[in-house]
Amino acid sequence: MTDPWYGGRWRRVGGPLALEWAADGWRLRLVQPYQAVKVYRCPGCDHEIPARTLHVVVWPEGTPDERRHWHRPCWDRRFSQLVKDNGHGS
């Protein structure tokens, strides 16, 4: 069953309240505005993600030290390109 918020290739991990997904060797966590207390720089567009902004944190599975904060549309574009480049099209 696909998740209604982040369906497709992603599967939800963790408990029912965990906003975390996994797909193709990547982990993704939704950061709610109330949790976003710092300013981050999105590696997809090189623009700031202001505090109190909904965004995602993404990292390769097994390497949480490599997690990065992304705007969701920037990550969606990047992930689509990674899937295409690796020949894992849906």
Image (cartoon, helix red, strand yellow):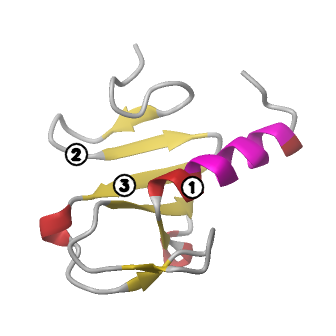
Relative to 42, residue 76 above or below: above
User: What is the distance, in whole Å, between disc 3 and disc 1 at their CAs?
Assistant: 12 Å
**In the image, what residue type sits under mark 1?**
Trp
Q: Main secondary structure of the magenta part?
A: helix
Element at label 1: helix
Extent of the magenta region: 76-84
Relative to 32, residue 41 above or below: below
Residue wearing tag 2? 18
Residue wearing tag 3? 29
User: What is the distance, in whole Å, between disc 1 and disc 2 at their CAs?
Assistant: 19 Å
Residue at x 68% of width, y 54% of height: 78
Residue 10 seen anywhere in this rendered image of the structure: yes
Element at label 2: loop
Marks 1,2: beta carbons within 8 A? no
Left or right of 29 in this view: 32: left
Residue wearing tag 1? 75
- N-terminal-most mark, 1 or 2: 2
User: What is the distance, in whole Å, between disc 3 and disc 2 at their CAs?
Assistant: 8 Å
Relative to 66, residue 89 above or below: above
x%, y% of residue 45?
62, 72
**In the image, what residue type sits under mark 3?**
Arg
Image-quadrant location for residue 36: bottom left
Within 10 Å of the Cα at label 1, are there few (<14), some (14-19), or many (20+) other Cα atoms? many
Question: Residue furthest toward the top?
Answer: 1
